[in-house]
Amino acid sequence: MKYLILLFFAGLSIGFSQTKKKPDFNVVGFYTGINDRAHVSFVHEANKWLAKMAQEHNFTYDSTNNWDNLNAKFLAKYQVVLFLDTRPEKLEQRQAFQKYMEHGGGFIGFHFAAFAMNDTDYPQNWDWYHNTFLGSGQYVSNTWKPTSAILKVAQQHPAVKSLPKTFASAPNEWYRWEKDLKSNADIKILVSIDPSSFPLGTGPKQHEIWHEGYYPVVWTNTKYRMLYVNMGHNDIDYDGGTNKELSLTFNNSTQSQLILNALLWLGGY
């Protein structure tokens, strides 16, 4: 009986220590979550999926739509920052983020987080972020409607570890950029659109259908601990007028593994 009691308390002690295990790292996602039903859908989906991954892989995940939290005191709590849909607009927020990245912070930006186009609500007025950090410059055009593409792993990196050489993505609106990322020595392209995807997009406008070209969709700037992922636009029933979700980004297991790999890499695991 004494032996059984000791085993019982030993089991309680092990269980208690496991539940109290210190998180390996902390992640925070910034978002706006207002404009474009497809982006809002992705934000809600991402917040749920990231919280689930945090529980399963022993990191913490917080989210905020208060971009004023982009300051040194707040960021000091986190090893990884995510931009889920937009970017900071205030000078002090931008300066805090740049300093965070220049001092070793981790970052993943999704889809619209890289958007910049003059004469819109998101003009190209942040040179360091769009030209130096992301390396992409302004947005130029996109495919339409949101369509699955065959993606090709371009080179080895922890974010694409164990991924197949090619895989089908979740439906997405794909972006084309002003800058040629291949010519930037600091940029390492990890995933691009495979030529077998063409024609990509359904229109109705002809320029929304791509028939050829080289399009990076996941890359890192080797001077920073960062990743940009072009995915982040769910398919929505705009034509039918219901605005229902027709696809979800994280329903794609291979694509989700890429993002989880990136989080663990940035978290140091």
Image (cartoon, rainbow, N blue to C red):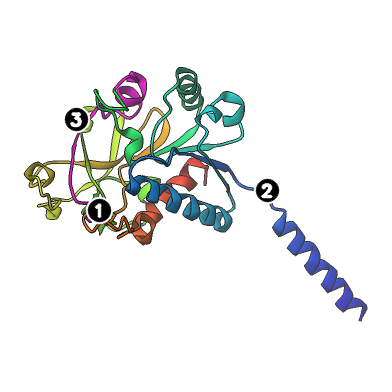
Residue positioned 43% across, 53% down in the render: 45
Tell me if residue 44 comes above or below residue 213 in the rendering: below
Q: Mark 3 points at which residue?
A: 180
Q: Nearer the viewer, residue 157 or 103?
A: 103
Q: Where is residue 144 in the image (x, y as percent from the top left)?
A: 18, 48
* Residue 260 seen in this snapshot: no
What secondary structure is found at the residue carrying circle 3?
loop
Residue pushed farthest front? 241
Q: Name the residue under label 2.
A: 22
Q: Is residue 91 left or right of residue 214?
A: right
Categorize mark 2 by other alpha carbons within 10 Å: few (<14), some (14-19), many (20+).
few
Q: Which of 256 and 154 is in front in this view?
A: 256
Q: How far apart are marks 3 and 1 (CA)?
A: 32 Å
Q: Which of 155 and 12 is in front in this view?
A: 12
Q: In which quarter of the image is residue 241?
A: bottom left
Q: Is residue 89 magenta?
A: no
What secondary structure is found at the residue carrying circle 1?
loop
The residue under label 2 is which amino acid type?
Lys
The residue under label 3 is which amino acid type?
Asp
> For the residues carrying marks 3 and 1, which lies nearer the camera in this image?
1
Q: Quadrant of residue 215?
A: top left
Q: Where is residue 117 in the image (x, y as percent from the top left)?
A: 25, 27
Q: Which residues, given as a range, are shown in magenta? A: 124-148
Tell me if residue 185 comes above or below residue 202 in the rendering: above
Categorize mark 3 by other alpha carbons within 10 Å: few (<14), some (14-19), many (20+).
some
Tell me if residue 153 comes above or below residue 18 in the rendering: above
**Lower sequence index among marks 1 and 2:** 2
Q: Is residue 6 left or right of residue 261?
A: right
Identify the disc placed on residue 238. 1
Residue pushed farthest bottom? 1
The residue under label 1 is which amino acid type?
Tyr
